[in-house]
Amino acid sequence: MRPRILFVGINPGLRSAELGHHFAGKGNPFWRLLYDARLVPDPITYRDDKKLPHYGIALTNLCARPTRSSTELRPDELKRGSKLLLRKIARLQPRVVALVGLSIYRELFGKVGSKGAGLKPQKLFGASVFVLPNPSGRNANFPSYADKLKWFVRLRELVESECVASHDVTEFQTKKSVATDGRPLCAMHKKLVKLRSCANRERGKRPLQVETRE
């Protein structure tokens, strides 16, 4: 099943490379943002990144080489990484490509790209393109946690609306309209679960499993 979201970081930091997990930098709030925006139903950390396919989420980087700062990446690395990323998007066919940082958007679309975070006018192999602020605490344009969270919430709203429109729904690890920590799911999540249940009864199929391949 195609991912609901493909998150794209620019490249691994040194600590992420050392630990072998995405967004593992100390103080990086990426995983907390996913939960607080209700993109995932349970609190997770970088140690849980292999659980993401279950939530209909895939995660990759523009460039594979770890650096202390993304400014250390060479132009040829960025160009090669962009080509590889486009191939991956064409293969995975995500509903939404979420670029974690405006610099990735500029690398892909150049000066023709629109400014700021949010939904963009371009499509990538049919996928909507959404730019998120870099969650790093050093991001001066989005200094507070709330500044970042609102864009993750808007991403969730976009993904939910597109999944409902297409009847392509990913169920979470619950048969009730609550997350495993007891929090009520939002009305859209309830609708998603109901749509999937109806679709399975009509088609006589077992629930689909989300799968991504690197």
Image (cartoon, helix red, strand yellow):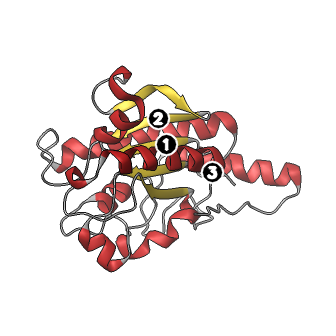
First reached walking from the N terminus: tag 2 or tag 1: 1
Residue at screen point 36% across, 37% down: 107
Q: Secondary structure at mark 3?
A: helix
Under mark 3, the amino acid is Leu
First reached walking from the N terminus: tag 2 or tag 3: 3
Residue hosting label 3 = 92
Residue hosting label 1 = 97
Give how far across and how far down residue 154 sits, in percent. Answer: 38, 37
From the viewer's perspective, is 32 left or right of 140? Answer: right
Q: Secondary structure at mark 2?
A: strand
- Please state, as top left, top right, bottom left or bottom right, where the N terminus lies in the image: bottom right
Give how far across and how far down residue 191 sits, in percent. Answer: 61, 44
Residue hosting label 2 = 129
Residue at screen point 63% across, 44% down: 90
Under mark 1, the amino acid is Val
Give how far across and how far down residue 120 sits, in percent. Answer: 42, 27
Residue at screen point 63% across, 51% down: 92
Q: Residue furthest front?
A: 76
Q: Residue furthest bottom?
A: 19
| Labels 2 & 1 near each other (Cβ < 8 A) | yes
Quadrant of the image occupied by residue 174: bottom right
First reached walking from the N terminus: tag 1 or tag 3: 3
Q: Secondary structure at mark 1?
A: strand
Residue nearest the observer in this picture, 97 or 176: 97
Residue nearest the observer in this picture, 158 or 95: 95
Under mark 2, the amino acid is Val
